[in-house]
Image: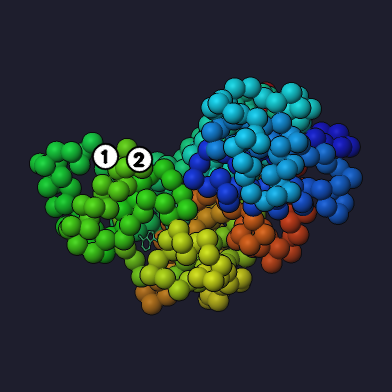
């Protein structure tokens, strides 16, 4: 630890589509940092980034945490400001940054670069791992190089869709190498936003156009009939995998609506699995974590076909959801680590990181 009391700056909100989830995650993290034994060790400064990307003073952060929702436009400091202007003065006291942000600008390396420049430790992955974890094209390339098993996929640039000739060859390639049903995804989003499951060419065209409206880079993946497993990873120099959980839902796939309405989905912890598959998931989760050089925390998601006994890695999330109902803290709770102990460990892993003086 840096000193007997450590001042932790919890940065949350953000200008991504996952703003509301970030607020709920921050409520859990701040409560845990201020609860139990932790209250003797940590002072928390909550920094709320509003939807325009402006960094607000801590009293506004406290209000947002208390109310659980983002403030009305007139109550926030930014008024007409947009983006990062400067750190609120209170940030000078912060000894460790704790980003609780999801999606672009929070989970993709941007803010991690800013933290790196402050020369203060921060929880979680650095620039490289964050960027790799966020971009599905780069992530899949890294996993593939590490020999991790993934469903067949192809990637395209949105500009390829504007030209009839290249569009025809895209259709041909997808239909011969991947076929239907397939999933069309923007490379850089999250929460299932912009993703579609398509069953024929017309839908494929619409799905590609939809994905292109979100991102320049598009992934098309073979659709598999599979269970969805998740494993949490925690660590600094030594990393650990949690027990394995499963998401079950009453929908064809885990789309945005299903993800964020509790009546449609449920976490099964531990997942009912043969011991060999549990072990395989944990080993692959650790391998994926190391492959992208992740730090601190990540949740690694898998597809598992229990008929053919096949396991594919789906993705790594370097700043996973941290609400009271989120898999990441629940998996650790079930593995014997309370959320208070978990956030304490995360701050410790940040403080111990070796790359601060670079
Ligand atoms: N290749 C696939 N086969 C079957 N289902 C898929 C496939 N890809 C995505 N899905 C479904 O879509 C959901 C969201 O996809 P994912 O790649 O995890 O995007 P996000 O990063 O937005 O969470 C998955 O949880 C799963 O339900
Ligand atoms: Mg996902």
Residue 223 screen position, x and y as percent: 32, 63
Residue found farthest to the left: 165
In this view, the residue in front, 334 or 150, is 334
User: Residue 221, percent across and down?
Assistant: 31, 56
Q: Is residue 132 left or right of residue 57?
A: left
Residue in the image at 16% along x and 52% along y: 171
User: Image quadrant for the N terminus?
Assistant: top right
Disc 1 + disc 2, Cβ < 8 Å:
yes
Residue 350 is left or right of residue 182, and the answer is right
Q: CA distance from mark 1 to mark 2?
A: 7 Å
Nearer to us in this view, 325 or 49:
49
Quadrant of the rendering where the C terminus is positioned? top right
Is the residue 87 above or below the residue 173 in the image?
Answer: above
Q: Secondary structure at mark 2?
A: loop
Percent across and percent down for residue 139 are: 42, 45
Q: Secondary structure at mark 1?
A: helix
Q: Position of residue 8 (x, y in %)?
A: 76, 37
Q: Which image quarter: residue 176? A: bottom left
Residue at 59% x, 22% y is 85
State the residue position of label 2. 215
Which mark is on residue 2? none
Residue 158, label in figure: 1
- Quick one: label 2, few (<14), some, or many (20+) residues within 10 Å? some
Q: Residue furthest front?
A: 74
Q: Earlier in the sequence, mark 1 or mark 2?
A: 1
Residue appearing at x 73%, y 27% in the figure: 91
- Image quarter for residue 163? top left
Residue at image location 55% in from the left, 38% down from the top: 51
């Amino acid at each position: 630890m840096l000193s007997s009391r450590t001042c932790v700056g919890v940065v949350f909100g953000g200008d991504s589509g996952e703003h509301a989830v970030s607020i709920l995650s921050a409520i859990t993290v701040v409560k845990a940092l201020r609860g139990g034994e932790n209250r003797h060790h940590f002072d928390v400064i909550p920094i709320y980034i509003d939807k325009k990307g402006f960094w607000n003073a801590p009293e506004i952060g406290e209000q947002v945490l208390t109310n659980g929702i983002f403030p009305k436009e007139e109550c926030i400091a930014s008024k007409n400001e947009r983006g990062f202007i400067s750190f609120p003065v209170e940030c000078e006291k912060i000894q460790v940054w704790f980003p609780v942000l999801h999606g672009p600008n929070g989970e993709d390396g941007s803010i991690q670069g800013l933290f790196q420049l402050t020369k203060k430790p921060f929880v979680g992955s650095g620039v490289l791992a964050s960027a790799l974890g966020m971009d599905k094209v780069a992530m899949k390339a890294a996993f593939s190089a590490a020999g991790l098993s993934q469903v067949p996929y192809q990637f395209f640039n949105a500009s390829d869709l504007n030209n009839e000739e290249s569009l025809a060859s895209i259709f041909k390639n997808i239909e011969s190498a991947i076929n239907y049903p397939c999933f069309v995804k923007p490379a850089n989003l999250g929460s299932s936003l912009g993703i579609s499951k398509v069953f024929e060419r017309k839908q494929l065209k619409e799905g590609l156009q939809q994905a292109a409206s979100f991102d320049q880079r598009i992934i098309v993946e073979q659709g598999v009939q599979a269970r969805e497993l998740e494993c949490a990873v925690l660590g600094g120099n030594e990393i650990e995998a949690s027990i394995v959980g499963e998401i079950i839902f009453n929908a064809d796939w885990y789309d945005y609506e299903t993800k964020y309405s509790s009546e449609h989905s449920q976490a099964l912890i531990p997942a009912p699995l043969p011991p060999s598959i549990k072990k395989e998931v944990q080993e692959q989760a650790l391998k994926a974590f190391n492959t992208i050089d992740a730090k601190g925390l990540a949740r690694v998601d898998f597809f598992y076909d229990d008929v053919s006994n096949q396991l594919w890695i789906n993705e790594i999330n370097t700043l996973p959801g941290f609400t009271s109902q989120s898999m990441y803290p629940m998996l650790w709770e079930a593995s014997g680590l309370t959320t208070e102990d978990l956030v304490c460990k995360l701050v410790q892993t940040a403080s111990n990181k070796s790359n601060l003086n670079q």
